[in-house]
């Protein structure tokens, strides 16, 4: 009986989706370390748009991930108002990961 109970608890723990929570915390650390949170927040506009607003605007746009990753790297202006987003010192891979994180909001 005790072994059965332990096996059930172990199965439940192993079935818990811990990877997405870890991935989110790693991405939150990355966007913070790269300075994104100085202008952006998940759910409210700061200097730049909220990540949730970006995700909503680009939902279903197959070209968005590449276009936004390029904007993260090179900067941009005019889509969200007159304040420009400066170029960011991130790798292509980092930019793609950050954009995927934002679009998943």
Image (spheres, helix red, strand yellow):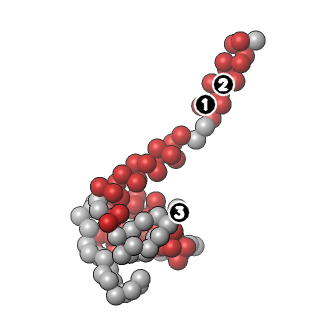
Residue receiving disc 3 = 105
On residue 50, the disc is none
Residue receiving disc 1 = 13
Eyeballing the image, is 96 above or below 11?
Answer: below
Eyeballing the image, is 19 above or below 24?
Answer: above
Residue receiving disc 2 = 9
The quadrant of the rendering that contains the N terminus is top right
Q: Pointer 2 and pointer 3: residues touching (CB < 8 Å)? A: no
C-alpha separation, residue under disc 3 versus residue under disc 1: 26 Å
Of mark 3 and mark 1, the one earlier in the sequence is 1
32 left or right of 16?
left
38 left or right of 61?
left
Eyeballing the image, is 10 above or below 99?
Answer: above
Percent from the top left, x then y, of residue 50?
46, 71
Q: Secondary structure at mark 1?
A: helix
Q: Secondary structure at mark 3?
A: loop
Of mark 2 and mark 3, the one earlier in the sequence is 2
Q: Pointer 3 and pointer 1: residues touching (CB < 8 Å)? A: no
Q: Quadrant of residue 98?
A: bottom left
Q: Pointer 2 and pointer 1: residues touching (CB < 8 Å)? A: yes
């Amino acid at each position: 009986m005790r072994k059965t109970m332990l096996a059930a608890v172990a199965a439940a723990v192993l079935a818990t989706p811990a990877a997405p929570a870890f991935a989110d915390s790693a991405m939150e650390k990355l966007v913070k370390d790269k300075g994104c949170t100085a202008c952006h927040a998940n759910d409210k506009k700061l200097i730049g748009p909220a990540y949730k607003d970006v995700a909503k605007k680009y939902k279903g746009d197959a070209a968005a991930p590449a276009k936004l990753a390029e904007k993260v790297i090179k900067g941009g202006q005019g889509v969200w108002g007159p304040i420009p987003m400066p170029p960011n010192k991130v790798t292509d891979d980092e930019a793609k990961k950050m954009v995927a994180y934002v679009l998943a909001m």
